[in-house]
Amino acid sequence: MALASPPATPPESISSPSSSTSSQQPPPSSLPALTRTLSHPPQTDFDVIAHYKNAIKSNPSLPVPIAAIESLVALLTHTPLTTVSETLALIDAQSLILRQWAANPIPISAGTDLFQRYLVASFQHRSTVPLLSVATLRAKLVATSKLFTSKAKIASQQVAANFLPLVVDDSLVFTHATTALVETVIRHAFNIPTSTLPLHSFRAALSSSSPRRPRQSRSLSSSILILSCHAVFSNGALLTPSGSHMLALAARDAGIPVYAAVESFNFVRPYPLSADAAELTKLGVKQRDLLASEWNHGTE
């Protein structure tokens, strides 16, 4: 895992995290203290971690924030409560359990924080409809949340559509630690021809990226690097797989444009002060050291 902080003046070859591969970052919003009104949150027999694991296992391409939101929606459905304070306290406590369990809690926090802000806003709106009971509102929240997650799952198609104009004739696309989103972006460009990108041209570029076709790879005149991204922080820094920062610097020196593919629901509020491992630890990321014996055996 690597944390890359943007320079004060980003190079022209490196795109802004939200320039063409995601929607604009929503304005930061502080979660009111209302979520911690109860010192002892309501108990539940619902296993939020097990539900999250099953969601990822059944659909490996499911974005982590969406899997976290689906788990909280299932929790809300399974545990009917009668007061606003109990509901918010339960969601807050179970969100904390889910984040503390994860080796990398940052993408999960993107989903849990978004869902908690949505709940707070919905309960605050309830004051304008005094006759609306908590049970009725909870049912509406569950239905709306399920609709939100279903729409969020197609966000990758929107990112792919925004990426398409960046691919020109004879493009060679480099990737690193490819995710489902990056694969969707590349497959979209692979299958849809444009006026500036004939279908056969990009297909030739993809096939030539194989180690079996080194000559054609070297002959391509245009290249881009697209990186997967786990989160975008409030200062514009990116949380990317290990090695991404080094590749981005090498690509910049070679004049190769660099883009990060990320959906807007991966924007998070933390503001990291540096890009070292200690800062990741402060953010709750647990990184396992690679032992020399494992390195010799080629394992991770």
Image (cartoon, rainbow, N blue to C red):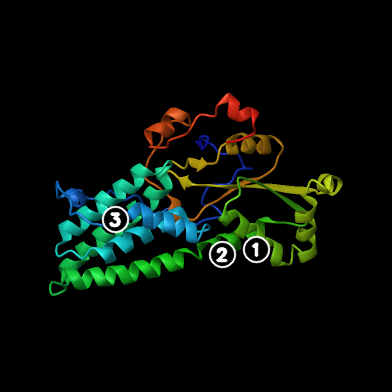
- In percent of width and height, residue 75 lies at 29, 60
Q: Which mark is residue 157?
A: 2
Question: Crowdedness of circle 1 by 10 Å Cα count: few (<14), some, many (20+)?
Answer: some
- Taking depth in this image into account, of 147 and 44 the one nearest to the observer is 44
Q: Is residue 189 left or right of residue 216?
A: left
Residue type, numbered disc 3: Gln
Query: Which image quadrant is residue 10 in?
Result: top right
Q: Do the residues labelled 1 and 2 touch (CB within 8 Å)?
A: yes
Q: Real-space Cα distance between discs 1 and 3?
A: 33 Å
Q: Real-space Cα distance between discs 2 and 3?
A: 26 Å
Question: How many numbered markers are drawn?
Answer: 3
Q: Is residue 140 left or right of residue 7?
A: left
Q: In which quarter of the image is the C terminus?
A: top right
- In percent of width and height, residue 185 lies at 62, 58
Q: Which residue occupies 36% across, 52% down?
A: 49
- Taking depth in this image into account, of 103 and 196 the one nearest to the observer is 103
Q: Which residue in the structure is indicated by mark 3?
A: 116
* Up/down of 18 relative to 275, above or below: below
For marks 1 and 3, the one nearer the N-term is 3
Q: Do the residues labelled 2 and 3 touch (CB within 8 Å)?
A: no
Q: Which mark is residue 188?
A: 1
* Up/down of 57 relative to 133, above or below: above
Q: Real-space Cα distance between discs 1 and 2?
A: 8 Å
For marks 2 and 3, the one nearer the N-term is 3
For marks 1 and 2, the one nearer the N-term is 2
Q: Which residue occupies 40% across, 55% down?
A: 52
Question: Crowdedness of circle 2 by 10 Å Cα count: few (<14), some, many (20+)?
Answer: some
